[in-house]
Amino acid sequence: MAGAFFVVLQRDLHVALRRKGDALNVLVFFVVVASLFPLGVGPEPNQLRAMAAGVVWIGALLAAVLSLPRLFAADYADGTLEQMLVSPQPLAAIVLAKTAAHWLLTGLPLALVAPLIGLQYGLPMDALAILLASLLIGTPVLSLLGAAGAALTLGVRGGGALLGLLVLPLFVPVLVFGAGAVTSVLIGISPSAHLSLLGAFLAVSSLIGPWAACAALRVALD
Amino acid sequence: MLEIQALACERGGTHLFSGISFSLPPGCLLRVRGANGSGKTTLLRTLAGLTRPSAGAVRWRGSAIDEDYRREMLFLGHAPGVKDDLTVAENLVYALRIGGFAPSGAQCEQALECLGIARLAALPARVLSQGQRRRAALARLALSAPVPLWLLDEPFAALDAAGIAVVSQLCAGHLARGGLLVLTSHQDVDIAAQTMLAIELQG
């Protein structure tokens, strides 16, 4: 189980290293989306500070949706996904490894860049720390639930748009509690309740996401 | 060792085949023939456990197919399963490691040598021709002696005469060791085998 996980994780990171553009595109997309908001709503500092967390989180959601269709599609097209399904490795380990690789390549860099965006919006230091924490807990949820959506829309025509419609509603709790954690710091209350709930979502989605993705992959390759 | 009982399949509501039964002893070659669209690939995918049959069962060593079966089975389908961004050698190593082997560098080199693509080892698979890509996928066979059941879907497609000779030799060696081989092919390639069976699918 652990062996399969690390082989597939290593393979996906190896492939990503040869296609640096894919991961970089998602990151740049996130930065651009987050930087467009002040141009649209005007430079009023208090207003910007209040909306910073929401903007960063919505940017993260959109970036995830942008990157998710590729999670299984490339392996599906060249037949390597089929080879993984007929391999003796447990499919759950393979799916979990691909999800982990997706998070390391999109969620993690995005979370690390987010404090810089927050700084642009004038967030104080303690709020920046909580923004980073909420993203570190919340973005794996996007990868885990997104993997299930990506597997469900595998091989479907126009799957990318469908994937967005499918997973964005599932991301709502993460958006609410992720942005809520930062807002609570700004108004002077403890963010621990929000972060605990995010942690709970992470626990639940790490069970549901891979399981649903496995079932969907078996159907997609039937 | 491999038993098929009254297997039936349909795709997209169309009936493909039904009532297929056979039993393969060790060292047996089964050729699956049939016109385009008669269900050869579906039959192989069913044997590999990818496609669920609408009736019947596939049994291996007397029990239904499970993880142990996948450990003893190698399936190579239409898509070669070769990643464009990785080199030929890396593709081989990852394919084997996901298949549960830990090949040494020398073994991999030997396998690529056997398929005549050793000089391409360090090239990304993106630049390969169709036939070279097929050879890169088939290089696994040279290191898959411990796997008793090989399911090969059109392994000779896109291969030149030399490639076909190498692959049929690998297959003959596998059968001589007591392995099982199920093969779909439009070409009539000679493969030496103790027992040979053929089924013809009527589309």
Image: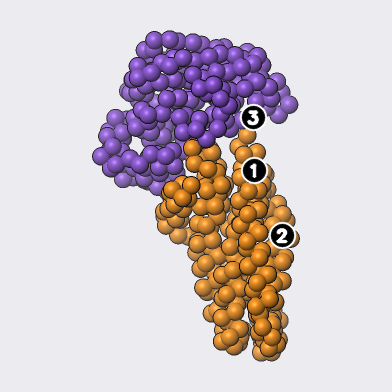
Please tell me if label 1 and label 3 are on a single chain: no
Provide the residue designation for mark 1. Answer: A215
What residue lies at 46% left-to-right and 33% top-to-bottom?
B71
Provide the residue designation for mark 3. Answer: B52
Q: What is the crowding at mark 3: few (fewer than 14 residues within 10 Å), some, or many (at least 20)?
A: many
- Amino acid type at circle 3 is Arg
What residue lies at 40% left-to-right and 42% top-to-bottom?
B97
Provide the residue designation for mark 2. Answer: A170
- Image spot of residue B194 (x, y percent): 39, 10
Q: Which chain is purple?
A: B
Is residue B73 shown to the viewer in this render? yes
Q: Which chain is orange?
A: A
Q: Chain of mark 2?
A: A
What residue lies at 56% left-to-right and 70% top-to-bottom?
A136
Q: How is the image coloured?
A: by chain
Q: Secondary structure at mark 3?
A: loop
- Image spot of residue B81 (x, y percent): 47, 38
Q: What is the crowding at mark 2: few (fewer than 14 residues within 10 Å), some, or many (at least 20)?
A: some
Is tag 1's residue or tag 2's residue first in the polypeptide sequence? 2
The quadrant of the rendering that contains the C terminus of chain A is: top right
Please tell me if label 1 and label 2 are on a single chain: yes
- Amino acid type at circle 1 is Ala
Is residue B131 shown to the viewer in this render? no
The quarter of the displayed image where residue B38 is located: top right
Q: Secondary structure at mark 2?
A: helix
Q: Chain of mark 1?
A: A
**Pointers 1 and 3 in contact (C-beta within 8 Å):** no
* Relative vertical location of residue B139 with respect to residue A9 in this rendering, above or below: above
Closer to viewer: mark 1 or mark 2: 1
Q: What is the crowding at mark 1: few (fewer than 14 residues within 10 Å), some, or many (at least 20)?
A: some
